[in-house]
Amino acid sequence: APVILWFRRDLRLADNPALNHAAETGRPILPVYIHDMGPGVRRPGAASLWWLDKSLRALDDSLKARGSRLILRSGDSEGELRRLIDETGADAVFMNRLFDPDAFARDADIAHALKEDGVEVKGWNGSLLCRPGGVMTGSGGPYKVFTPFMKALLAKAEAPPHTLGPREIDTPTSVKSEAVDDWSLHPDKPDWSGGFDWTPGEAGASEALSDFLSKGLKTYSVGRDRPGEPGSSRLSPHLHWGELHPWRVVEQVRKAASDGRVPAAEADKFVAELGWRDFSTQLLHHFPRMTDTAFRPEYDAMPWLTDIKGFNAWKKGLTGYPIVDAGMRQLWTTGWMHNRVRMIVASFLVKDLLIDWRKGEAWFWDTLVDADLGNNVQNWQWIAGSSADASPYFRVFNPTTQGAKFDAKGQYVRRWVPEIAALPDKWIHAPWTAPAEVLRDAGIGLGRDYPKPIVDHGEARDRALDALKVVTRSR
Ligand code: FAD
């Protein structure tokens, strides 16, 4: 009887534990992807679906090159698995686990139900350096602070051996498949994906990694904070969709250091950042309520505002703060935003506008190609001061000084906010402070070509700190 290989967010053939185990059985393999937009598990946002569309096609091509193909089904996951079992006589389902709380719970229910009917169901970790629960504190609980977590992880977790997957995959030809074209995964109303410049899929992921190893990694610790330069890896969507194994990334990065191609400190810094991905996922896994409530419950007492105008200005990149607007437009145009700028725009929403972090999280979820439940929720709560290991709430990012510090020459702002590109560097992050004649010479009418700031940062900061008193009082 064939084995069902249930692909989800492990869209690759190399270093894929479920595939390797399926191949070891020596039985025919049915590689399936089920497009399940039902309730229970947070649905991928529009930008994620754009990625998924391309990544599934790439996976299908790789499978075809090995004599197999990807079987596509849509509908309720358990129902579709059962249908496939009935159609083919398969008696085993192998998968790489998802650790987000909602997907994890659903998969456990499916496994339980199928096992009761005599189907073998097995899962492996194919996405994290260490499965949640793999490292715990001395007293047996989950880590809530990043640094000791990462230290323990690096001491304990081991890289799995590198595998390329079977050269030939035997898949029965008679099994029906839907067509990805029929799923309409592209955003249509509106289709804003024209500026997305990515190569989803396993080959694209390897290329992105090689590119980073030869360029950005050398100067990562500084370069990662310069949004105007290509200093980070841009591996996030590839990692989210499982197009490469994080251990392969770590190994290659460490090898670049041991070969003397990059300084060891740069490699270490990168591995630590990658560790935040594991940290965030395990935190959400152990504290599922954190998906939509503050990890520190007193932060749910924040007197959030319903500022629809402010929220819209933020989404559209029309706040009058160039670095914020540049970030929001980069997000809309490319499906990605630089990490430093994600922190600045998130702080602006939560503190300067006093809008609930959940609203920002939802917007990111819909527009990021790397939207990831653990990373998105944990980072939003980090900014909002409510996560387990968070930036203190009273640390309010100043968009002007952040811009001047990390985009000193204004390359980033000029790229994404072209209407103020002619301003000299001195005023590029604070156009409202430019003398009238400077604005005139640059041909910029503030309030006409580019908005005046929608809030005064100093006043907004005071208001945010005032709001925090409600939280500290309720503690
Ligand atoms: P690199 O600097 O090259 O880092 C390599 C990898 O490490 C990343 O691809 C990512 O997988 C991981 N990583 C790096 N920084 C973090 C971090 N702070 N938290 C978790 N993992 C990290 N990242 C997502 O993948 N999905 C999200 O939905 C997401 N939402 C975010 C929301 C906010 C408000 C903030 C401040 C950050 C968010 N991040 C998210 C984290 C981070 O911004 C991105 O992972 C990073 O910008 C991706 O670019 P890169 O691959 O070039 O990063």
Image (spheres, rainbow, N blue to C red):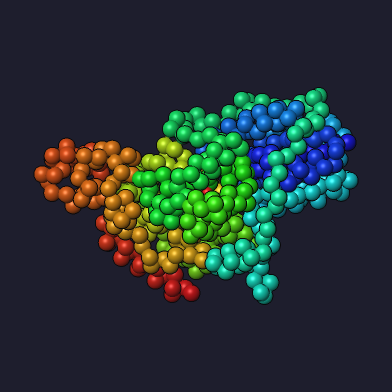
Q: Quadrant of residue 175?
A: top right
The image position of residue 104, as x and y in percent, is 69, 52
The answer to which image quadrant residue 75 occupies is: top right
Towards the viewer: 253 or 263: 263
User: Residue 361 at x, y = what percent?
Assistant: 49, 51
Residue under the point 62% across and 31% down: 58
Residue 69 relative to residue 382: left or right:
right
Most distant residue in the left direction: 437
Q: Is residue 256 visible?
A: yes
Query: Residue 344: x, y in percent?
Result: 38, 54
Number of labels in the image equals 0
Quarter of the figure with the N terminus: top right
Comparing 337 with 265, the one in front is 265
- Could you tell me if residue 291 is visible in this image? no
Residue at image location 82% in from the left, 42% down from the top? 24
Decide if residue 461 is on the left or right side of residue 53. Answer: left
Residue at horizontal 56%, vertical 36%?
204
> 235 left or right of 440?
right
Q: Nearer the viewer, residue 79 or 48?
A: 48
Q: Is residue 343 left or right of residue 272?
A: left
Q: Is residue 356 above or below residue 211?
A: below
At 17% from the left and 49% from the top, the residue drawn is: 434
**Percent from the top left, x then y, of residue 96?**
71, 47
